[in-house]
Image (cartoon, rainbow, N blue to C red):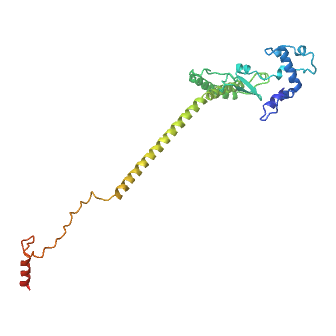
Amino acid sequence: MDDEETELRNPFPSPPSHYARYTNHNLKLLSLLRERLGPDADLYSINQYEVLSDQTDLPDWPLAQLEKPRVDWILEEGHYTVFGDTWFIKEKIPSLAELGGHQLYPADPSVDRRPALRSVLRSILVTYSKLLSALLLPPPTASSAHIEPEWKRHLEWINVLAQNIMAAANDLRPVQARGNLELMMRRQVELRREETKTIHSKCDALEAQLAELRLASQPDTAAAPSAPPRPVPVAPPANSAQTLNSDGVSIHDVLSWAEEVS
């Protein structure tokens, strides 16, 4: 039995030794036994040799061991065993009391555990001080050799106290994971907001540059006023020798002045 338990706890265990019992003959005997007793009968409480007295090669172990695991029993117990390890149906962290330890803090998570954990921490410090004092005592004599040394009791109690501290810390793992997830999500939101703000500022800068280029590409009609239209000169008629210019001097006067100068 010990060898089988050791084999089941190996990293790569071999199949259980009773797998060889699942032969066709044994399965037929089990089916016949169930047929004769009915589907609701308890096979562990009956004598299979009396029910199957007309059959040959009956095994010396109960045929009920060949039946499939009872799911209702597993649901009732809340756990099952595979390769020597116990697995719970509902994933949860087992408490120290459920693991067989001496639990010194309240099992109800809604109760404040800080007073109990402070007492455990003070007990660790006091017990450690007593352990140091016990180690400084002289060695036991021959008459007191059968008495358990004091330092051993202190060491065992420190082990119990340390187990309570570790178990209480493990109970806070879901809270720690939830806090880390919340912090990570907040950081992601902040990063996305910063990236969005950077994108918006970059878009604003590009829009401003595009507006400047759009204005530079258009003609500057509003800055310089338009020049007045230049008058078209009109040639005077042939008989207009007496026509006056803008200063009141006729062409005849100009010709006369030119002859006098020459």
In front: 154, or 145?
Answer: 154
Apparent side of residue 105 relative to residue 67 in the rendered image (left or right): left
Apparent side of residue 80 relative to residue 118 in the rendered image (left or right): right
- How many marks overall? 0
Answer whether residue 151 is visible to the viewer in this image.
no
Q: Position of residue 235 (x, y in %)?
A: 16, 73
Q: Position of residue 80 (x, y in %)?
A: 73, 24
In front: 51, or 157?
Answer: 51
In front: 73, or 214?
Answer: 214
Q: Quadrant of residue 126?
A: top right
Identity of the residue drawn at 49% across and 40% down: 190
Q: Residue furthest bottom?
A: 262
Q: Is residue 119 above or below residue 224?
A: above
Q: Is residue 22 above or below residue 201?
A: above
Apparent side of residue 12 relative to residue 105 in the rendered image (left or right): right
Identity of the residue drawn at 40% across and 48% down: 204
Q: Position of residue 189 (x, y in %)?
A: 50, 38
Identity of the residue drawn at 54% across and 34% down: 182
Q: Quadrant of residue 113?
A: top right
Q: Is residue 150 above or below residue 261?
A: above
Q: Is residue 115 above or below residue 200?
A: above
Q: Position of residue 134 (x, y in %)?
A: 69, 26
Answer whether residue 50 is visible to the viewer in this image.
yes
Q: Quadrant of residue 60?
A: top right
The N terminus lies in which quarter of the figure? top right
The C terminus lies in which quarter of the figure? bottom left
